[in-house]
Image: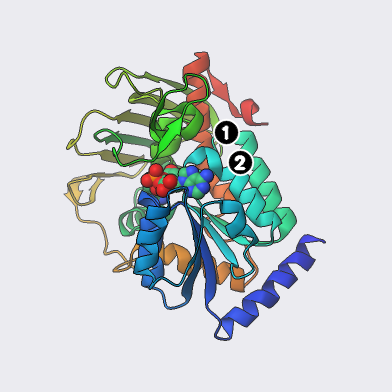
Amino acid sequence: MTRRDAMTAAAGVSLAMAQGQRWKIGLIGNGNRGTAHLGAYVNMPEANVTALSDLESSRMAAYNTKLGGKAAQYNDWRELIKDKNVDIVAIATPNYLHPEMAIAALRAGKHVLLEKPIAIDYKLARQIQAEAKKSGRVLAIGMQRRFMARDHWVQQIVDSGAIGQVRFINIGEYRGDWSPKGSLFTDPESGRRDNWRFFQAAAGSTELEFSVHAFSQVTQLAKSPLARCVASGGTVHYKDHQTRDICQGSIDFANGVRFNYTFCLFSAGTPGNTVIVGDKGTIRYTTESGILLDMAGKKGQAPPPHTGFSGEKPEVAMYREFFAAIRESREPALNAELAIEAAKIAYAMEIATVENRVVTARDFA
Ligand SMILES: NC(=O)c1ccc[n+]([C@@H]2O[C@H](COP(=O)([O-])OP(=O)(O)OC[C@H]3O[C@@H](n4cnc5c(N)ncnc54)[C@H](O)[C@@H]3O)[C@@H](O)[C@H]2O)c1
C-alpha cells in the first residue's frame, strides 16, 4: 500500500468519524501522565475511551470508574492493540516501551498519540517515524508545551521581529526529585527495582525525560538543525539514580544561534529562567514572573498582548489538533520530525557527556 492509498483509507475512517462517530481511543499506561490524557478526554465530547491497558489492574479500574465503567480493560497491551473497537492508541508508558508499542499499534492500523520522548535513542525514533510513514496512519508525539499560552506568546513576539534575529538562548531549569509515585522498573544490569526514571535503560536520560520540552521551545525559536554540542553532568546528589541529577550543555545550531542549558534536580522551589537574545532586543522571564522585553533605551517593558491558546488545557488543544490531522489526512502539528529535532539535543548531550567529546551533526547522519 502506498502512503497515498493508506492515507485515503484512513480518510475513509476519518470521514465516518466526522459524520457523528466519536473517536474510539485505547489508552495504554494509566499512571501519572495517563491522568492528563484522561482529563482531556472527559472534557472532549468527541473522545470515547473504549479500552484501557495497564500492568496494574487497580489503576485501570480507577480510570474506568471515571469513564462510567464502559472501557474494556487489558493487562496485556497487545490485546488492546488488537481490539477492533479502538481506532486511536494513546501511549503513556515509561519511555523504553514507546518504540515497541507505537510500532505495533501503527502496524495494526491504529492512529497513535505517543507520549514524549518519542524513543530512548535516535535510531529507534527514526524507526517509529518510518513506520508511521509506511502505515499511512497519523502519529503525534505528546509535546503539549507547543500549545501552552506562555510559549506561544514568546514565539509570537519573536516571529513579529520585535527582538530581531535570535542569536542566543539561555535556559535554566530547577526542580526537586522525580515523583515517588512513578511505576517500578527492574534494571536488567543490576536487578535493582525502583522508580523507572532512575534508570537509563527505562528513561534514556534526564535531558530526554524532562528537558525535551524546553528543547522543543528552543528548536522552534532557533529554526535550524543542531550543528554542535558539548555537555557535562552527573549524579552528585541522589546516589540511587543512574540518570543525571545535574547537567549542562552548549549547543550551536547550523544558522549560528547559540543555546546554553542548565538543569538541577535537587533545587525544588528555585524559579526557572529563560533569556532569548536577539540583535534588536531581549525577552526574559522566570517561572515566577511575567514576560519582559528589553529594547534599546526601554528596559523591562510589557510585550504586546497574547492571542491564541488561552483558557484551554494544552492536552485538549493537542488532541483537537491530532483529531483534525486524522480527519484531514495530514501530518499533525506535533509530528515525529518536531519531536526528533527536540530529542536530538538530549541525545547529543547524552553522547557528549558519556563519551566526553564534541557531538556534531555527523553523529546523526
Ligand atoms: N508530556 C508531558 O508533559 C509528560 C509529563 C509526564 C510524563 N510524560 C511521559 O509519559 C510517560 C509515562 O510517564 P508517567 O509519569 O505517567 O509514569 P508512571 O510511572 O506514573 O505511569 C506509567 C504507567 O504505565 C504502566 N505500565 C508500565 N509498563 C506497562 C506495560 N508493559 N503495559 C501497560 N502498562 C504499563 C505503569 O503501570 C503505570 O501505570 C513517559 O513517557 C513520560 O515521559 C509526559
Q: Is residue 182 above or below residue 314?
A: above
Q: Amino acid at mark 2?
A: Ala
Q: Which residue is painted at 38% across and 35% down in the image?
A: 168
**Seen from this angle, which residue lies furthest bottom?**
19
Q: Is residue 365 above or below residue 232?
A: below
Separation of residues labelled 2 and 1 (CA atoms)? 6 Å
Badge 1 crowding class, 10 Å Cα cut-off, few under 14, some 14 to 19, many 20 or more, is many
Residue 54 percent location from the top left of the image: 47, 51
Helix, strand or loop at mark 1: loop
If the image is split into quadrants, where does the N terminus sit? Answer: bottom right
Which numbered dot is residue 125? Answer: 2
* Residue 119 in which image quadrant: top right
Q: Nearer the viewer, residue 360 or 46?
A: 46
Residue 182 percent location from the top left of the image: 35, 40
Helix, strand or loop at mark 2: helix
Q: Which residue is painted at 48% across and 26% down in the image?
A: 187
Whether residue 328 can be seen here? yes
C-beta proximity under 8 Å, tags 2 and 1: yes
Q: Amino acid at mark 1?
A: Asp
Residue 172 percent location from the top left of the image: 29, 34
Give the left or right position of residue 208, taking residue 359 as reference: left
Q: Nearer the viewer, residue 72 or 251?
A: 72
